[in-house]
Amino acid sequence: SGAGLPLLVQRSVARQIALIEVVGQGRFGEVWRGHWHGEDVAVKIFSSREEKSWQREVELYQTASLRHAHLLGFIAADNKDSGTWTQLWLVTDFHPFGSLYDYLANNQLDCNVTLKMALSIATGLAHLHMEIVGTQGKPAIAHRDLKSRNVLVKSDLTCAIADLGLAVRHNSSSDTVDLPAPSQRQGTKRYMAPEVLDETINLSCFEAFRRADVYALGLVLWELGRRCSDGVNGACEDRQLPYFDQVPSDPSIEDMRKVVCLDRQRPGIPSRWDDTPLLVGLARIMKECWYHNAAARLTSFRIKKMLAGLNDASAR
Ligand code: ADE
């Protein structure tokens, strides 16, 4: 029961929301800015063909104790009969700055904001990854499609992780993963860890999914670093996706496998970063997210602590 609303109110939310404008185009139809009781909300609309994806994402959002400052806030799920077909709605918080991917195209970041964004994404991921035992508990969850397009920028310039449509939960008593039926959607090829690309990942091991998320987190940190300007001469790299100079646009699995698995390349670290302590620290963390050997990678908890350490160091 999202947002703690009574069931009767929740069932009719779609009738109470006015759709204002399209703000995004996802793999599953459109994301709209809507108005609900005088407030902006985001409405992700799935067609009935995509019911399984809608169902899965709603189920994940309704997982107990998932609410967190750095995870997109769930409000409601609803059906709307448009006369000829049924729309499936997912209503969440609305963040006017939009996705991190879009934000980085239009904005340079200072070191404070870079670190604040990095720390908030790592904190959101660590909360997702963590199992909390007890009545107020939550299962450990792995995201499986972490990328800058699935991160939203909040008005305080911290971030929230969105799109739980591919996420999997860990059942710790049976040590199993609730992987949905295969043939469904897979993650974004560009952000796939080497073991996902070459299909050596052990799909029955929950820890393996956490490690693949950490690899993707490293790529998002790299995207942030490129837009961090040290303020001395205001220069930084342009917004680019990871591997932009190593694979074609819309790369195939084969393209990615050649670069990431066979040649073991990783995104380049610009020499400019050597002059900025934050970027030196960030680069060190990224490299430890990108090990070919997944077991050697940092955990999201450790990354969160290391970033908090960079925060303290820069405050001194
Ligand atoms: N684009 C996709 N989801 C969004 C959201 N929740 N808020 C703002 N823009 C979005």
Image (cartoon, rainbow, N blue to C red):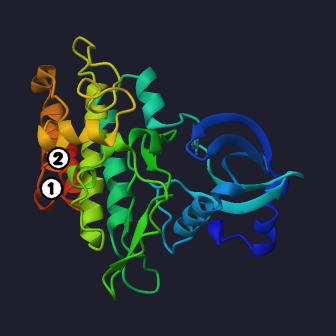
Q: Residue furthest top?
A: 233
Reading the image, the residue beneath label 2 is 290
Q: Residue at x 12, y 34 (%)?
A: 280
**In this view, 132 is above or below 265:** below
Q: Tag 1's secondary structure?
A: loop
Give the amino acid at mark 2. Answer: Trp
How far, Cα to Cα, is label 2 from label 1?
A: 7 Å
Residue 30 point in image, percent of width and height: 65, 41
Residue 108 point in image, percent of width and height: 36, 22
Confirm whether residue 315 shows in the render: no
**Rendered image quadrant of residue 211:** bottom left
2 and 1 marks in contact (CB < 8 Å): yes
Looking at the image, tell me whether mark 2 or mark 1 is earlier in sequence order.
2
Confirm whether residue 204 shows in the render: yes
Relative depth, front residue between 85 and 118: 85
Give the amino acid at mark 1. Answer: Arg
Disc 1 crowd rating (10 Å Cα; few below 14, some 14-19, many 20+) is many
Reading the image, the residue beneath label 1 is 297
**In this view, 294 is above or below 4:** above
